[in-house]
Image: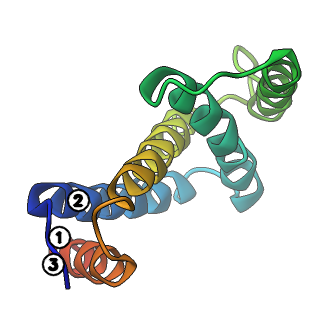
Amino acid sequence: LRLGAPKLHLLRGCMLAAMTALNFWALQYLQLAETGAIQFSVPLLIALLSAWWLGERLDARRWAAVLCGFVGVLLVIRPGSHAFHPAILLCVGNAVLYAAFNMLTRRMAATESPESMQLLSALTAAAAA
């Protein structure tokens, strides 16, 4: 196991534990279909974060895809309607955290081994749980 950035491994593990907790908390109030639909926003968030954090360029087609995906998520969660439940914010927080988790994984992949990233994030999350 290579540990070039132990603090980042710890951060990934804590993020994994937090994502799990947010998801189970939201499932107490929402249906699985709603939480699953909100998770479809994760690729959109990753595209936005990679443009901002990693400096990747998004062309007009990708921006259009991000916009269409966001509209689809809004159709499912219906903010401002009677169907909107505050627990949806837990799902949104989970989606943002998951996108950040993926971006961190991508950044760490250049210096860390896949085995160490898997093992240490799982052990940290298990200890936190």
Whichever of callouts 1 and 2 sits on the residue coming sooner in the sequence is 2
Residue marked by disc 2: 14
Q: Where, by quadrant of the figure, is residue 112 drawn?
A: bottom left
- Name the residue type under label 1: Ala
Q: Any mark on residue 42, and which?
A: none
Q: Is residue 127 above or below residue 40?
A: below
Q: Report whether 8 appears left or right of 53.
A: left
Kindly identify the residue that appears in the image at 11 percent across and 63 percent down. Answer: 6
Say which of 36 and 56 sits in front: 56
Q: CA distance from mark 3 to mark 2?
A: 9 Å
Q: In terms of depth relative to the viewer, which is nearer, 120 or 71?
A: 120
The N terminus sits in image quarter: bottom left
Q: Secondary structure at mark 1?
A: helix
Q: Is residue 114 left or right of residue 61?
A: left
Q: What is the CA distance from the residue labelled 1 to the residue labelled 2?
A: 7 Å
Task: Judge depth for marks 1 and 2 and give the one in front.
Answer: 2
The amino acid marked with disc number 3 is Ala
Image spot of residue 107 (x, y percent): 38, 49
Q: Which residue is mark 1?
A: 128
Residue 52, above or below 43:
above
